[in-house]
Amino acid sequence: MMHLPDKNLIKKLLIWLIVLVFIIAIADITYIFFSNRKKDNDTAVLTENFLSYVQNGDIQAAEEIWPAVYTAKKNDIKFLNSFSNVLNDVYIKYYSDTYINDSSNESMYEICRIFHSFLNIDNFNSAASSVLDDYLNEIITFQSFITAANDYFLFSGYSSSHIRSVIDKGILLNDSRNIYYKAEEAAELKEYSYAIELMRMVSTFDSLYYPKSILKIDEYILLLTEEVKNGS
């Protein structure tokens, strides 16, 4: 006669089986959790190192880990914004070192050239506009302005309409200032009528020289009036 399994034994086995499955599940979840956490920590360290390399101009180290960083962070908006801000600092440092302090840094140039597409449009336009502002305020020469603006045009992949506008405005300023200097030369030769005519051609865009031209016009009108009175 066949004996049926003990019901209590079956219950115990089922309970132990359920407990075993539960333990395995908890172990898997714990492993996955800590694996992901380690992976996240590793990625965080990697990206932090990368941004540090970029900021310090260590182009070789940055390029070595860039593929891994890009793979992990290419869709991470927070990282991309941080990267853009770091690049903006690099752009400013490159420009300042090269065109103001006369101490060119080739590694900074290479970082600007290689990673230019990750500098967001607002940061890029701001950096480019600062070159025009510096020329406007006579911090750099016209030649330095043109060279720096062309660098930025290169960094944009020769596609930035903003750079074209910046260059056009710089040329306008240069033409206007040449007119101003020519007017001063005419005044030195006592050609006041011609000097007044030239000063009136100084561009209103030139916030530094346009106010000067207004004062010069008043000065030359007085000198011209004196000449007429004296029958010169």
Image (cartoon, rainbow, N blue to C red):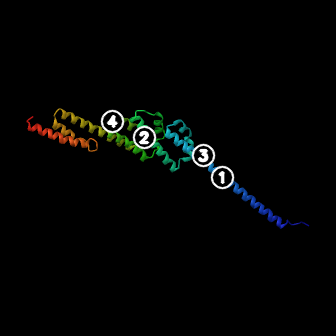
* Quarter occupied by the N terminus: bottom right
Tell me the residue at 55%/37% (across/down): 61
Q: For mark 4, give the secondary structure.
A: helix
* Quarter occupied by the C terminus: top left
Query: Which corner quadrant of the image does residue 186 belong to?
Result: top left
Q: For mark 3, give the secondary structure.
A: helix
Counting residues from the start of the chain, the first of labels 4 and 3 encountered is: 3
Mark 3 to mark 2 CA distance (whole Å): 30 Å
- Binning the other alpha carbons within 10 Å of mark 2 as few (below 14), some (14 to 19) or many (20 upward) gives some
Q: Is residue 170 above or below residue 35?
A: above
* Residue ID for mark 2: 92
Q: Nearer the viewer, residue 139 or 120?
A: 139
Counting residues from the start of the chain, the first of labels 2 and 4 encountered is: 2
Q: Please, what is the three-letter code of the amino acid marked with disc 3?
A: Asp
Residue 135 is situated, as x and y percent measured from the top left of the image, at: 33, 39
Mark 2 to mark 1 CA distance (whole Å): 43 Å
Q: Please, what is the three-letter code of the amino acid marked with disc 2?
A: Ile
Q: For mark 1, give the secondary structure.
A: helix
Tell me the residue at 37%/40% (across/down): 131
* Residue ID for mark 1: 32
Do residues under tags 4 and 1 come within 8 Å of each other at their CB atoms?
Answer: no
